[in-house]
Amino acid sequence: MLLILAAVVLLWWRSSLAPSWYQPPDPQVAQNIERADRFEYGVVVQAQKVRPQSEQWSVQLTEDDINNWLSSRLPEWLAHERGQQWPTDLGPPQVKMRLGRFDVALDLGPQTGGRVLVVQLEPQLSEGKLRFDTTRLSLGRVPISGDPAQKLLEILEGVAPNGSDIQQAMQPLLDILLGRTALEPEIPLADGRRVIVHDFILNEEQLTLTNQTLGRSED
């Protein structure tokens, strides 16, 4: 009985420990804000370049740059694009890139004792659609057994009841992670052109996208 109790206490304690790599950039630090702005501007410049329609071009996105953007710019993007506020109880998300997959960590806030949820994702680009397979789930440093997608749904519904600010902000992301929503690998540009993502390579700390810029749909 004591061994079982000790094991339960150990698991509960380990669930309170964030992964060692979960250290989101501070969005209040000017240097981080400037870096996020430069990153966003650089991506926009690459996307807007006039290129032959037959040309394929690549862009490299580093883990550090993406995490700076998530910490500094995600709330503003969410407010502008979806008219929603990033929930104050949630910490900023952070990604950890691996070979062929990536982990997303998110501080679930004070109602969970600041526990960090970690979702392991494998992106798949096929038949012109981008989908994500949820392959593993952890709370802190404790893996959660069972179907990862179903467990993810249960955890987020427990933290964010229907109608809550967290639920509204997380629902689009949750639909993607649960496979309810596939993404079009297409980015519309302001002048009517489109950037199509044909392929991607996930390596340690870097994502490489292979793209093609097409003309206006009526061209």
Image (cartoon, grey):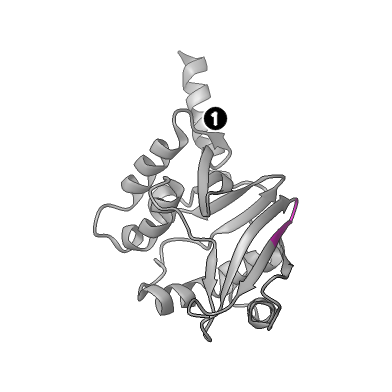
Residue 218 in the image: x percent, y percent?
Answer: 48, 79
Amino acid residing under circle 1: Leu
Dividing the picture into quarters, in which one does residue 44 lie?
A: bottom right
Q: Tell me where the magenta segment starts and ends, as one range.
A: 204-209
Residue 194 in the image: x percent, y percent?
Answer: 55, 74
Q: Secondary structure at mark 1?
A: helix
Residue 35 in the image: x percent, y percent?
Answer: 69, 78
Whether residue 59 is visible here, answered yes or no, is: yes
The residue where tag 1 is placed is 10
Task: Look at the picture and state if 38 lies above or below 200.
Answer: below
Residue at image coords 61%, 55%:
95
Whether residue 25 is visible here, answered yes or no, is: no
Residue 111 in the image: x percent, y percent?
Answer: 38, 52
- Residue 166, magenta (yes or no): no
> Residue 30 or 6: which is nearer the viewer?
30
Q: Which residue is most to the bottom? A: 191
